[in-house]
Image (spheres, coloured by chain):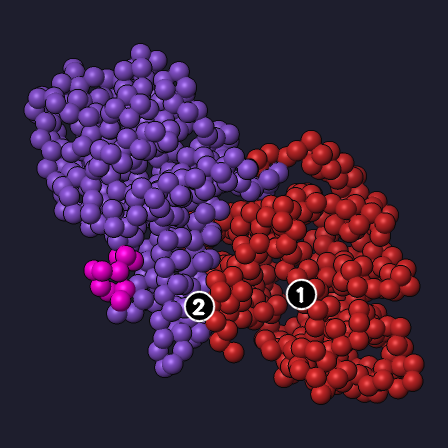
Chain colours: A purple, B red
Amino acid sequence: MEFGLSESQEILKDSARKFFAGECPMEEVRRLMETDTAYDEKLWAKLTEQGYTGIIFPEEFGGVGLGKVELILLMEEAGRALLPGPFFSTVPLAGAVINAIASPEHKKKYLEPICEGKARATVAILEAGANWNLADLKISSAGSKITGEKLFVTDAAVANLILVVAKDGVYVVDAKASGMTITPMAGMDMTRKIYAVKFKDTPAEKIGTTGNLSKALDIATAALVGEMVGGMQHTLDITVEYAKMRKQFGKPIGMFQAVQHHCADMYLETESSRSAAYYAAWTLEENTPEASTAVSIAKAYASDAARTVGNRGIQVHGGMGFTWENDVHLFYRRAKASETAFGDSIFHRERIARQVIDSETISAKSA
Amino acid sequence: MDLNLTADEKLFRDELRSWLASNAPKDWPEWKNKPLEESYSYLRKWQRKLYEGGWAAVSWPKEFGGRSATLMEQSIFWEEMARAEAPPMANSLGLGLIGPTIIAYGTEAQKKRFVPKILSAEEIWCQGFSEPNAGSDLANLQTEARLDGDHYIINGQKVWTSYGWIGDWCEVVTRTDSAAAKHKGLTVLLVDMKTPGVEVRPLKQMTGESEFNEIFFRDVRVPKENVLGKVNDGWNVAISTLMYERGSYGARLHLIFKSHMTRLIELSKKFQRNGKPASEDPIVRQKLAQAYAEIEIMRLNQMRAFSRMTTTGVPGPEGSIQKLFWSELNQRIQQMAQEIFGPYGQLLGNDPYAVDNGTWSYGYLRTRGNTIEAGTSEVQRNIIGHFVLGLPRSY
């Protein structure tokens, strides 16, 4: 039993950190967030070169074939850098969905271009009710055409493929398809743009049923938690650094216990989220029976933790924390968007409750 | 990262599991609520049995009667003990804290004299650390030990001593050099509790029971050879004991919490709220799920800390969050139980309407101590702030 990172996992994480620090420093994040799509073609090419766009996908479709733990580590570093653009939408979300539900022919057609960096993709799930229970979706295809509106679709404007989760299956809509209008929604997080996507008799190709979708969405959710952990870590790091440097009453403010204790709680919440994220990734990789509960535990905990770490980080930064110029609010905005994506803590606690209250017994032995 | 058991770990688990299947007593629940002396002698017998089977202290080196178990095997040990619903061990401070400190710092003669009897529960140990004016600021302790020929003469008072009432021996931290800086003038002495001048008094706590004691030392003579470690190096010896305290406890607490959760979930189906079982109330469900998640995260934090300790040999930064995490979580679990039980929650064990014979009303009061004992939450946050995050010391 070993719950540390292997040497190759450490290397991957370390090289991802260096890569993002070099290719996507905060100045670049700020430049991209002011653009319409937060997408940069050159950065995408570099992500592809690193093999990141194919990280968990089979080699036969141009992927790298690594595991979910490696994916979570990469996402953690992407989150630490506040990587803008459609990486999350394309790889751990749309890519994972295609990989989980599509036929080999469809994978060749849709997953391979993702691995090769030629296609960006996203998944449209939520409708007006903003309900993450897939059983409650209303849109369904009429033959091979889709009509209706999907909301909160991340990165839709730069996606070549939009996967639509409908009542009767998962469909791929080409970005150039007729009858589709993509309208920006004014989300708080400027680094990951969201859109309302309207379909009117839009041609769509069915790639699978919703039966195997939950596993793929669990992978996306765990990946998002990994990203949230990176964001928390960055917030903690800059907060501690500030507390050491900023002086009031002739002393660094980090000397005051009221400030230290905020930092200590941020550390506890960050590390605990990390433990939960890594474990969720491992259970998904091993396909253990508790995987979906482990994902819900991670998302429930991290959704609250990411917000409170941000609250404390802003508070410790004092007046500086309330300025546009300081980075702490950029992470805070991302944390809010991520908090509700794929279900907030209330949603996931209810999922846990169904597992552990409504099923008769909890196994006394969990490992 | 591989959370599956290795072949060696499986072997360890299977051997233990089959030993427990034929040796773990089933009647502990009947003994639990008997007078302390009776239930304690039951636990002594149980530890003796573990000792004879070679299972009393798996973490200890083989040469001292342990199994040199890895941290992961120690986790497995506690998992299996919980699975078998085995009783706890009588000499828990001796096994978990004081034995390992004697093995690390003791002379050959001390190891030979004390260690086997700790294992067999022939001699029960207690810990004389805190004093009325030395709680969080432990190094401020004033109990004095003055050299007089071949003996030290101890005068002073200790408080919050667990097992003081039954202790045969006590690890006492004393001040041997009052002129030195407060961390530098301390010495640890191993004191026979039957020595003239040692007086043990019960310390009645807010729960109404006396789990802890006060110990008074009046001209207590302790032979020089009972110094543990070096004279005036007692701070390091004491810190080493406190490190074991953190390590040995964490491995099994999540199991205890989990069994409380299992029971609380059962009870939530019996207690009503708004005409329905509490387990169907959305707010109760949210709270139960949150506690369940946090207990699991506590286990995972512990596992990560163990893995890091295994590779680096030192406790990782995750270790420092465990005490903070479990103590505050335990209070939330008890608070939640009270919310589920409504007015029944307040009833003490002697009331026929009490829930689970008053276990929960007791737990509600007892857990207030969790964020104080073994380092307050405030001290834990200071430790994280300074030693983990590198913020300047506040005191």
| Disc 1 target residue | B242
Q: On what subunit does the disc labeled 2 rest? A: A
Residue A345 makes an appearance in the image: no
Q: Is residue B116 above or below residue A61?
A: below
Q: Choose top left, top right, bottom left or bottom right for residue B111.
A: bottom right
Which x, y percent locates residue B326?
54, 58
* Nearer to me, B45 or B315: B315
Q: Identity of the amino acid at label 1?
A: Leu
Which x, y percent locates residue B329?
50, 59
Where the N terminus of chain B falls, by quadrant?
A: top right
Q: Residue furthest top?
A: A105
What span is colored magenta in the figure?
A: A320-329
| Disc 2 target residue | A261
Asked whether A82 falls inside the magenta stretch, the response is no
For the point 24% across and 28% down, the residue is A120
Q: Is residue B345 above or below residue B219?
A: above
Q: Choose top left, top right, bottom left or bottom right for residue B349.
A: bottom right
Which x, y percent locates residue B174?
75, 79
Asked whether A323 falls inside the magenta stretch, the response is yes
Q: On what subunit does the disc labeled 1 rest? A: B
For the point 46% across and 30% down, the residue is A67
Residue count near mark 2 (Cα–Cα under 10 Å), binned few <14, some 14–19, many ≥20: many
Which x, y percent locates residue A35?
15, 43
Residue count near mark 1 (Cα–Cα under 10 Å), binned few <14, some 14–19, many ≥20: some
Q: CA distance from mark 1 to mark 2?
A: 22 Å
* Nearer to me, A280 or A85: A85
Residue A192 makes an appearance in the image: yes
Looking at the rendered structure, the secondary structure element under dot 1 is helix
